[in-house]
Amino acid sequence: MGAKSAKHSLESQTLQQLRKEVDFSEAEIQDWFSEYVSRLPKGETELTRDEFKNVYNTIFYGDATQFSEHVFRTFDRDGNGTVDFKGIIADICKMCSNTY
């Protein structure tokens, strides 16, 4: 499973760092974070590959397993088998800005 002790709001320092890195407002980052945390197993701060696939399959119709595997590999930059919020939000921002 992922790392321990999930929080329900971003620390101010983390939020300010993300504001410099992504093209989302503080409110948007907090909304994304709240959604991310709501999908985490209790006490976790990162999603495993299987947890990520389960979330992905609840968002899309049909079986998105193969596509979610590809997305997970993209988000799991260090190859440790988990994805964290900061990595996901940075990649989402890049995809939205079409500079990925």
Image: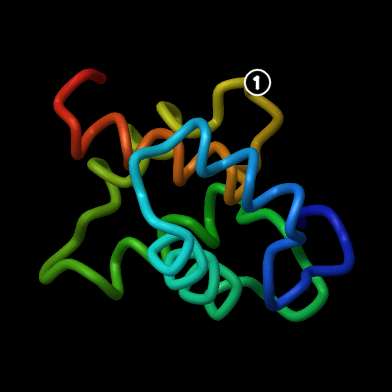
The amino acid type, in three-letter code, at marker 1 is Asp
Q: Quadrant of the N terminus?
A: bottom right
In this orientation, which residue lies closer to the viewer: 32 or 53? 32
Q: Residue at x 19, y 61 (%)?
A: 63
Residue 92 is left or right of residue 80, and the answer is left
Question: Circle 1 — which element?
Answer: loop
Q: Which colour style is shown?
A: rainbow
- The structure residue drawn at horizontal position 47% and vertical position 43%, both measured from the top left corner, is 88
Quadrant of the drawing holding the C terminus: top left
Q: Nearer the viewer, residue 62 or 91?
A: 91
Q: Which residue is mark 1?
A: 78
Q: Quadrant of residue 56?
A: bottom left
Label count reads: 1
Residue drawn at x 76%, y 49% is 13
Going by the picture, which residue comes out furthest to the right?
4
Q: Position of residue 92 (x, y in %)?
A: 33, 42
Hey, which quadrant is residue 6 in on the image? bottom right
Q: Is residue 56 left or right of residue 83?
A: left
Q: Position of residue 9 (x, y in %)?
A: 68, 73
Task: Residue 20: give x, y in percent of width and height.
Answer: 52, 34
Image position, residue 65 (x, y; %):
29, 51
Crowding near pointer 1: few (<14 within 10 Å), some, many (20+)? few
In this view, 30 is above or below 84: below
Residue 96, above or below 10: above
- In the image, taking residue 50 as reference, residue 82 lies left or right, namely right
Residue lying at 23% horizontally and 42% vertically, measured from the top left = 67
